Image (cartoon, rainbow, N blue to C red):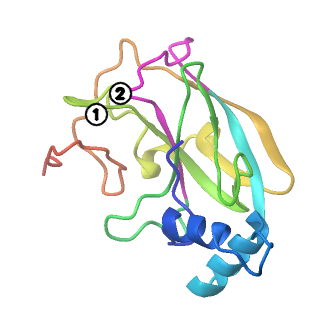
Amino acid sequence: MLQRRVFPLSAGLVLLLSLAPAGCNHTTSESEALKKALDLSGKSEQTVVKFSGTVTIDGQPPGPDRRNPVFVIAYDPKNPPKGRQLPFTTRCDKDGHFQFNTYSTGDGLPAGSYVVLFAQPKPDGDALKNLYNDPDKNAKDEHFQINLTPPGKADWLFELSVSGKDPVTTRGDHSVMFDRGKKKPG
């Protein structure tokens, strides 16, 4: 699954550190590799909270569109992304299931408050009609405001309604776009 990590390390560096021997017959464990990677980046490990669940679109799972998956985005309004940086992002499987990963598979996100966004990029735009990719708009709907506290939750359900709705043609200032090379209308 596509993820934005808490610390800006390349996967190659983490892999290299996890495979690098620390002695004659000692293999670096995953936790040792993580500690080394965090030390190298000057970061410390944050408490993460389980955040996983299911997304439906018009009452149905997204389906097996591997080239155009549905993305679930956790936008932190107190720490918005800078420049081209994306918020925490993961993709749904064909059944609509999603899980966020920070340090290991399915461990979740750092504890905190987020606005949940959704997008399904296609070559001609967002298949969800830009209805769910604006944090300013989604923040006004309590269903998209989440407060992640330990131990978290694995059964979130987000029911999106797209059919019969007009597309949003004027994107918000903070809309998260997967534009596939298209320019944001200005």
Position of residue 42 relative to residue 32, above or below, is below
Q: Name which of mark 2 and mark 1 comes first in the sequence.
A: 2
Q: Which residues are magenta?
A: 55-75
Of helix, strand and loop, which one carries label 2? loop
Identified by mark 1, the residue type is Val
Residue that label 1 marks: 168
At which x and y percent is residue 164? 36, 12
Residue density around tag 1, few if under 14, some if 14–19, many if 20 or more, within 10 Å:
some
Horizontal and vertical percent position of residue 44? 70, 81
Does the magenta-highlighted stretch encompass residue 72?
A: yes
Q: Name the amino acid type tagged 2.
A: Arg
Regarding residue 56, the answer to whether it shows in the image is: yes
Q: Quadrant of residue 158?
A: top right
Q: Which mark is residue 24?
A: none
Q: Residue at x 66, y 85 (%)?
A: 39
* Of the pair 147 and 11, the residue shown nearer to us: 11
Residue at image mark 2:
67
Please tell me which residue is depicted at 68% across the width and 60% down the height of the picture.
103
